[in-house]
Amino acid sequence: MDKIPILKMGDYLLVTIQVDLYDRLALNLESDLVNMINKHSSKGVLIDISAVNIVDSFMGRILGNIAQMSKILDAHTVVVGMQPAVAITLIELGLPLSGVHTALNVEKGMTLLQEKLFLDSTVIADDTDDNT
Amino acid sequence: MITLNKETIAIKREQDVVFFRNRVNEYAEKIKMGLVNKTKLLTAASELVRNMLIYAKEGKVICEIVTISALQTGIRLTFIDNGPGIADIDKAMTDGYTTGKSLGLGLPGAKRLVNIFDVKTVKGKGTTISITKWKNG
Amino acid sequence: MALSIGQLLQKKSKTVLESWINIQLQDDGLKEELLSNQEIRKQSEEFLHSVISILKKEDSQNTESPEFEKAAEILTEISTSRAMQGYTPRETGVFVFGLKEAFLSVLEKEFKDSLVPYADSQKINKLIDALAILTFETFISSREEVILRQTSEISEISTPVIRVWDGILALPIIGTLDSARTQVVMENLLMKIVETESTIAILDISGVPAVDSLVAQHLIKTVSATRLMGAECIISGIRPEIAQTIVHLGIDLANINTKASLAHALRSAFMMLKLEVRKTVEKPKF
Ligand SMILES: Nc1ncnc2c1ncn2[C@@H]1O[C@H](COP(=O)(O)OP(=O)(O)OP(=O)(O)O)[C@@H](O)[C@H]1O
Ligand SMILES: [Mg+2]
């Protein structure tokens, strides 16, 4: 019953967190996302946290986990729309989320994902060049 | 320090955390605490209440609006549990120390986010942590 | 039956008031342009009555009684308004201590040859002293409030965030960067990033006199917070001696984009945004 909806948009997955996340909900999101990436072979995940007022170490770790896990599954994760007060607090807390890509809003996040995918495809093209 | 407003909230289940955070939020709005300071306080509170649930199973939090002068008003939260206590508090207060499989950021991070941080812990008896955040500090 | 000290002073309150106001007006520090005669009279009268009502009570030392609280309230208001108007503590002190003088001089006349009873003068002394301490406390705390407000105003004024290009913000920092200031800088910068949807912020530190490890830490925090929002931060204006201290102190700025000057930073920002600035070549005229 307690689920955060995940939207599929072509190669991407979009999650908009609207509610105050408590721990179980965040954990559910982590496993749901990983399953969805696998099921749809998604290339990118966009997590919009513009409505989130608190990100504590637990939430921060979940975001980091999602980024790492999706990377293993060959998808990029971009966290978008973090509020200034949340960013300042995370830095003071000691959690710079260094492994997570960020963007100002969904639109810019989407552009970033496309750039990353484009880079991936050129790398693959280079690889095939080498092989032949 | 003078207490203007006081209330005790029991923490037994994860759902209590949401109620507790909302209460602290109301307190912060009542004294017109700035957004960044409020976010810092709520985040520190979130860390400590989670520790309480994980390591001591349950406990309670006393929420107070305190003042020391006309210009220094703030919120004091006192987290009281009867859990196992913290064996080595100096270690627990350093970044990265955890007995769980976590980041070990909760205690030292919470300390950085508030103005006053005070721990009393007795092994086998429990832990009391009091934090104070000034409205404009 | 002899009158108690409180009753006696109540009866003589007009004389006390006159002599007290005279004492206040004699003080050359008094700023006539700020406080009119009328106002002194009104404030003094109100306060005098509340003090006499305390003296009439048995427990005049009780700071919790409603009478004391009333007097304290009046006094707090007076000393707060005086602090705001820029009075010195001495000038405000004269207000309270002048009352003691007025009381005692009236009583001396009243008792003529015999001395004022010790217990009575002690009662007055203690009460006025307690009220005087209160005056100073309020005076100082309202001054602190003024200072606090000014400090926050100054730090806000001194950290302007400029939109230099579509998507590029610049923030020249002038003066030292302490933790309170960093807070303001960060807050202003991040808000402006959201507001203007800028993806690059240039932090120019050519106006920062020295960079020690604490300042560097503040800079690193600002850069990290900017990145969390999804924007990039360039630090410019690093003078050679600052580069030297950074290395000598062993501060790690490896993950931070640094540039010598604002112009260099701007050029690199243009590159990041895939913008090009070119000189237009004028067609030669024949
Ligand atoms: N209320 C408590 N009762 C008993 N032990 C505690 C309590 N709070 C903290 N501890 C102990 O202190 C250690 C450090 O706590 P801290 O919150 O800093 O890190 P963590 O909870 O392990 O990780 P994180 O908070 O980053 O997820 C914990 O691992 C735990 O052993
Ligand atoms: Mg913890």
Image (cartoon, helix red, strand yellow):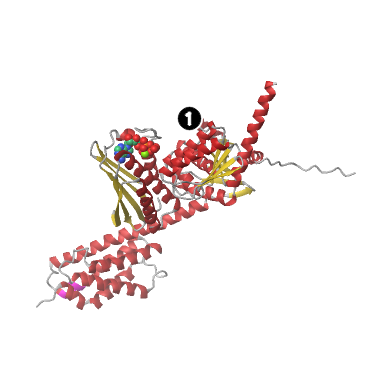
Q: Residue at x 39, y 55 (%)?
A: B28
Above or below: residue B90 compared with residue C185: above
Which quadrant is home to the C terminus of chain C? top right
Position in image of residue B37 (x %, y %):
42, 50
Camera-nearest residue between C219 and B111: B111
Boundaries of the magenta span: C106-110
Chain ID at mark 1: C
A131 left or right, relative to C226: right
Above or below: residue C81 compared with residue C259: below
Q: Quadrant of residue A92?
A: top left
Q: Quadrant of ligand 1?
A: top left
Residue carrying label 1: C250
Residue type of the residue flagged with mark 1: Gly
A24 left or right, relative to C274: left
Q: Residue at x 36, y 63 (%)?
A: C80
Camera-nearest residue between C102 and B7: B7
Above or below: residue A127 compared with residue C41: above
**Viewer can see residue A96:** no
Position in image of residue A42 (x %, y %):
58, 37
